[in-house]
Image (spheres, grey):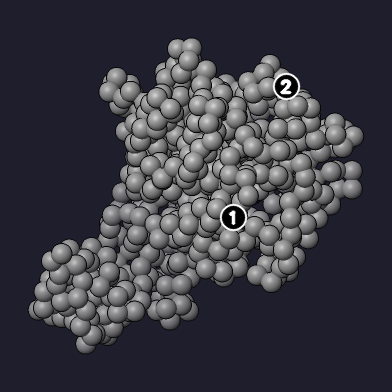
Amino acid sequence: MDSVTVTIDGIQVTVPKGSTVLEAAEQTNIKIPRLCHHPDLPPVSACRLCVVEIEGDRLLRTSCSWKCEDGMNIRTKTAFVRQSRKVALELILSRHPMLCTECVRNNNCELQEAAEQLGIRETRFEYHARPGGVDDSSAALVRDPAKCVLCRRCIQTCELVQSVSAIGIEGRGYDVWVDTPFGKGLDDMACVSCGQCINRCPVGALYETDHIARVWKALDDPTKHVVVQTAPAVRASIGECFGLPAGSLVTDKMVSGLRMLGFDKVFDTDFTADLTIIEEGTELIDRLNNGGKLPLLTSCSPGWINFIEHFYPDLLPHVSSCKSPQQMFGALAKTYYAEKQGIDPKDIYVVSVMPCTAKKYECQRPEMNASGFQDVDAVITTRELAKMMKQVGIDFPNLQAGEYDAPLGIATGAAVIFGNTGGVMEAALRTVYELVTKKPLDDVEIKSVRGMEGVREAVIDLDGLKVKAAVANGLANARKLMEKIVAGEADYHFVEIMACPGGCIGGGGQPMPTSEDIRKKRVEAIFAADRANTIRKSHENPAVQKLYEEWLGEPNSRKAHELLHTHYTKKSIYKEAVA
């Protein structure tokens, strides 16, 4: 590979040709401040905090976008550079309300970090609020334009990563801000509630709808039997909120922490992930054998479901009728579990801990009440669970090991890999192979569907029946697959879609910061959890087998359809345009 050598503050560094000055500086452990730059996104050079001097150039250059050239001499800490950065940040602060202790991003804010690095304690410019009020119309997200620093990360993410384009720049000149088209609320737009914009916002201009207060209220109510379920991806990421390295697998500590918060039972969404595989796998086999709509599209990701409802509603017949594991759990908690425990379903309060903001939207969908009640009462993100633990002083890194409660806490390795892109596909194929062939699968690790690429394809031989599969993560990649299906250019049998990059491990409710490197470390942790499990196929989960024997009868039975399956609805880009 071609390389170039540059000198940064007297230090020579060799980098691949095409590298930016910022990338070169990071190799020399020089921390250049920035607000608009994010490793997942192309540079826009909007904030001007990362400027540097280049010998022979009369202008300061933005290091996030300026490419290194061989022999270049770069200076990052001259008086000119320091003063320019300080003025740029003071101008940004002049449009930002200084209400840090009231902000959800306090002590985890890139604006605070930059101000600290540049030694800013006050600004010389008068404060002028940005236009636009708080938008809390969405069930999942809140926008506060007053805190926006115009980094444009949210716009890039919504447009380039997710291909939704629910937000953009409004106004001109001094009075410019980020808004939805026509100033509508997010609830009136084709926002899919994925929360990827939150995970790339450097400040508190975007954050999830808070469910913490309602969870505390339920925990404080002696008449409520409060149970909690934890998604697969949370165990591989919550440690980051407490200073542990990315990819730390902390399942046992997380369970202990939840008990200390006061939950009556600590269960695992992995239980219903196993159940989903059996129901969805049976559905796939039926479509393959009986001429059903193909490809079968997975339905676990609520952001993806919102996306197809808005943008490809004609393809809804291809979507699996299975509810997500979260919603299956809620339905079972207020029926099967309630009956076994002799508890009135109205007194059971179900809390989910999810890596996903779209789960907040999903839990209040009108279809999700198979138990006769709202199946899931509250959803807290990984970040919100960490906040709750910090509020009561739980020393998470030093907690002793805890174990999930039975029966809804028993799960297999196949279920835990739901947290990664390709995981649902792999888990399903482990089961479908054995159901179709009646033979044991020699190697349960189906590596052909693993990886972090945006779209992956594989052909799996089920003892002569060749199943063509595709996996996509990130909605821009999902759109590519949908366009191929619409054009008749795809002959897939089974397609897995996850709304977020990397799958649930990169969800909108996960710890910040996020990057490809962090997501890869979380993926490694999830696969480690799978390898450590003694049972790695969903259909071999003894608690799920007992559920069918005692309650459901058989996969895709009438009772299973009543509790575990649903339907989805055509939506328009703008709410009032729906017929």
Q: Any mark on residue 532, and which?
A: 1
Question: Residue 320 location, x and y as percent?
Answer: 52, 25
Q: Is residue 246 left or right of residue 228?
A: left
**Crowding near pointer 2: few (<14 within 10 Å), some, many (20+)?**
some
Residue in the picture at 27% in, 69% down: 23
- Which residue was labeled with disc 2? 553
Q: Residue at x 84, y 43 (%)?
A: 225
Q: Are marks 1 and 2 in contact (CB under 8 Å)?
A: no
The quarter of the picture where residue 24 lies is bottom left
Q: Residue furthest top?
A: 290
Counting residues from the start of the chain, the first of labels 1 and 2 encountered is 1
* Residue 59 location, quadrant: bottom left
User: Residue at point 61% right, 23% down?
Assistant: 566
Q: Nearer the viewer, residue 342 or 77?
A: 342
Residue flagged by tag 2: what amino acid is it? Gly
Instruction: Assign the N terminus to one quadrant of the image.
Output: bottom left
Question: Residue 206: in sight, yes or no?
Answer: no
Element at label 2: loop
Could you say which is closer to the camera, residue 59 or residue 387?
A: 387
Residue 539 is situated, as x and y percent measured from the top left of the image, at 62, 34
Residue ID at (47%, 51%): 506
Q: Regarding mark 1 in the picture, which secondary structure is present there?
A: helix
Q: Quick check: 421 above or below 470?
A: below
Indicate the position of residue 251 as horizontal and vertical percent values. 64, 57
Q: Is residue 384 above or below residue 459?
A: below
Of the pair 441 and 86, the residue shown nearer to us? 441
The correct choice, above or below, for 345 with respect to 236 in the image is: above
